[in-house]
Image (cartoon, rainbow, N blue to C red):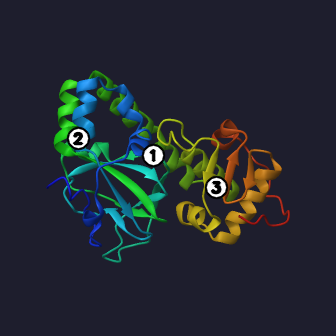
Amino acid sequence: MSRNTPYNSGRLLRDRARPPTDAELAEIPWLERLTPIERERAVAALVVGDAEAGDHICRFGRPVTFWFGLVDGLLKMSNDDSQGQGPVITFTGVAPGGWFGEGTVLKHEHYRYNITALRKSRVAGLPVETFDWLLDHSIGFNRFVMHQLNERLGQFIAAREIDRLNNPDLRVARNLAALFHPLLSPNVGGVLRITQQELAYLVGLSRQRVNEALTTLAAKEWIRVEYGGLRVLDLAALRTGVLDAPLKAGMIPL
């Protein structure tokens, strides 16, 4: 696949691919781990494309050709529901700065999940061949991928625990904590730009129920709702905190 075809999308995202700008390169966290020669090779291979809401970045069953990262926007990873065999299950969200699918790239296998844009997003792609070359030549890159895999494993173990939670407020809290992960989503910072509907898609709850959960978490001073997004005040509490019965405070617009 050529430099201008990084996406497996039926909506022709490949036609939107272009070289990254300097500002976009600055948003790629693993580039700083590379030596000058390694960085030069990686930058020459990287491409960036724009995805509209609903576009597929990765599709179930398609062969892997690129390792992807989110420059800006919001993505979700979910199971394949094309055969109508059961409900759609969202595995995780991908926030700015997050790179994903390294396990699939390492094994050179077909995707076992879909990655879909929840809003207009900018996605970077590194060809599999360059990914493999960096693994063979770069200690810094290997360390980044190793830490990435380790944190991803912890994230999915936590996701299994979240699925068993009966408290919707805690489900929202734990999912927010995952989106603010300092390694898996390093460019989020203190504020996540997300709407209640987008959060509802990721958590698997109604928008109204998400609103109630945000009210509870704000009352506990774990988060603060700001215009167009959420600010984390206590990340540790979002990850491991315990809540009493859900509060019935007034709704919070987001």
Residue drawn where x is 58% and y is 51% of the image = 175
> x, y percentage for residue 151?
44, 36
Q: Residue reaching furthest front?
A: 22
Label drawn at residue 156? 1
- Separation of residues labelled 2 and 3 (CA atoms): 40 Å
Characterize the local packing of mark 1: few (<14), some (14-19) or many (20 or more) Cα atoms within 10 angstroms. some
Nearer to me, 232 or 200:
232
Residue drawn where x is 65% and y is 70% of the image = 207
Q: Amino acid at mark 1?
A: Phe
**Helix, strand or loop under label 3:** helix
Q: Amino acid at mark 2?
A: Ala
- Separation of residues labelled 2 and 1 (CA atoms): 33 Å
**Which is more foreground, mark 2 or mark 1?**
2
To which residue does mark 3 refer? 172
Sequence-first tag of 3 and 1: 1
**Helix, strand or loop under label 2:** helix
Characterize the local packing of mark 3: few (<14), some (14-19) or many (20 or more) Cα atoms within 10 angstroms. many
- Quarter of the image with the C terminus is bottom right
Residue drawn where x is 34% and y is 66% of the image = 56
Residue drawn where x is 67% and y is 60% of the image = 228
Characterize the local packing of mark 2: few (<14), some (14-19) or many (20 or more) Cα atoms within 10 angstroms. few
Q: Amino acid at mark 3?
A: Val
> x, y percentage for residue 187?
52, 42
> Quadrant location of residue 27?
top left
**Helix, strand or loop under label 1:** helix
